[in-house]
Image (spheres, rainbow, N blue to C red):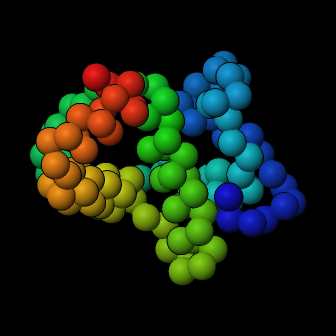
Amino acid sequence: MCGADDELRVHHLDGRRENTEAENLVWMCRDCDQNVNTESEESTTWNNHAVVLPDEISAKIDREFIRLVCVCRRDLGWRPDKTRHYYPLVAVDGVFAVGRMTAEAFEERLVELGLR
């Protein structure tokens, strides 16, 4: 993810080591693997919005967060927090994108994702 090619480890996206399905595994360097699941001490829940997502979509969200942790650490020297940084940005940018859709485009996208 960050481009390192030494000391690679297998990371389990769902956090369960017993789940060895290919979709649940990504290669990561030691530093990224140690940092990806560590939330900052400043994390607080501002609002609690429970969302049930299909496994495929949830995995995409997790994979992208892992990628961002790796590239932010490598390129910028800091680690984004999943609760304080990633989820709010995904929500805001998602709401923005959906807000620009017509009803037809909205329904088409739901069909593409297998949600309708």
User: Farthest residue in the front direction?
Assistant: 104
Residue 9, compared with residue 49, is above or below; it is below
Residue 54: image quadrant is top left
Q: Quadrant of the N terminus?
A: bottom right
Residue lying farthest to the bottom in this orientation: 76
Residue at horizontal 55 percent and vertical 32 percent from the top? 15
In the image, taking residue 41 as reference, residue 66 lies left or right, namely: right
| 57 and 5: which is toward the camera | 57
Q: Position of residue 81 (x, y in %)?
A: 39, 59
Q: In the rendered image, which quarter contains the C terminus?
A: top left
Outermost top residue: 18
Q: Position of residue 103 (x, y in %)?
A: 14, 42
The mark total stands at 0
Q: Nearer the viewer, residue 105 or 74?
A: 105
Question: In the image, what residue occupies the spot 68% across and 35% down?
Answer: 25
On the picture, is 47 further left or further right than 110? left
| Residue 25 in sight | yes
How far across and down, in percent of the image, does residue 60 sit?
Answer: 49, 41
Is 30 displayed left or right of 86 in the figure?
right
Q: Nearer the viewer, residue 21 or 38?
A: 21
* Residue 95 seen in the figure: no
Residue at the right extreme, as displayed: 6
Along the viewing direction, whichever of 114 and 57 lies nearer the viewer:
114
Q: Is residue 60 above or below residue 14?
A: below
Q: Is residue 16 above or below residue 108?
A: above
